[in-house]
Image (cartoon, grey):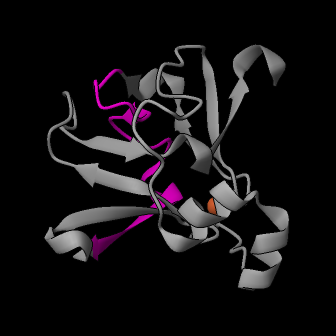
Amino acid sequence: MATEKVVKSEEEWRQLLTPQQYHVLREKGTEPAFTGQYWKTKTPGTYRCAACGQELFSSEHKYDSGTGWPSFWRPIAEARVNTEKDFSWGTFRTEVLCSRCQSHLGHVFNDGPPPTGLRYCINSVALDFVAKDAK
Ligand code: FE
């Protein structure tokens, strides 16, 4: 299924999102570790993009990385996220963005568990959790 892109002006995003969501999603901010809503969450369900609602990550691929951010070893599907090289703060990292609305979600690192060895380190505030039973 081809993904319909969501394109909005920064002014529109500003009106739709809370200031904290706007800062992370649209200004590539990072929430402080261990402060977000979902780093400990183990409830079965789906994590959606807080900006456009696309389903991004599943509780099935979530694990406790000890970092204080929700961590996943894969997205629901490769096509749900885009990655970009990020050289900010004097280090090289790989940024993770929602493929539908190009909002910043977090970063992906190579120190995750098998089978992928990846750690998608995602800001809670960039996600909207929907419990399986609630669907
Ligand atoms: Fe999105």
Quadrant containing ligand 1: bottom right
Quarter placement of the C terminus: top right
Q: Position of residue 50 (x, y in %)?
A: 69, 51
Is residue 72 one of those drawn in magenta?
A: yes
Q: Position of residue 47 (x, y in %)?
A: 61, 37
Of residues 125 and 76, the one drawn nearer to the viewer in this rendering: 125
| Residue 21 horizontal side relative to residue 119, left or right | right
Residue that appears at 22% across and 63% down: 93
Question: How many numbered marks are there?
Answer: 0
Highlighted magenta segment, given as a residue range = 64-85
| 82 shown above or below 109 | below
Of residues 57 and 35, the one drawn nearer to the viewer in this rendering: 35
Q: Position of residue 52 (x, y in %)?
A: 73, 60
| Residue 49 horizontal side relative to residue 117, left or right | right
Q: Is residue 57 visible?
A: yes
Q: Is residue 8 visible?
A: no
Residue that appears at 64% across and 55% down: 20
- Quarter of the image for residue 1 reads bottom right
| Residue 25 horizontal side relative to residue 34, left or right | right
Residue that appears at 53% across and 31% down: 58
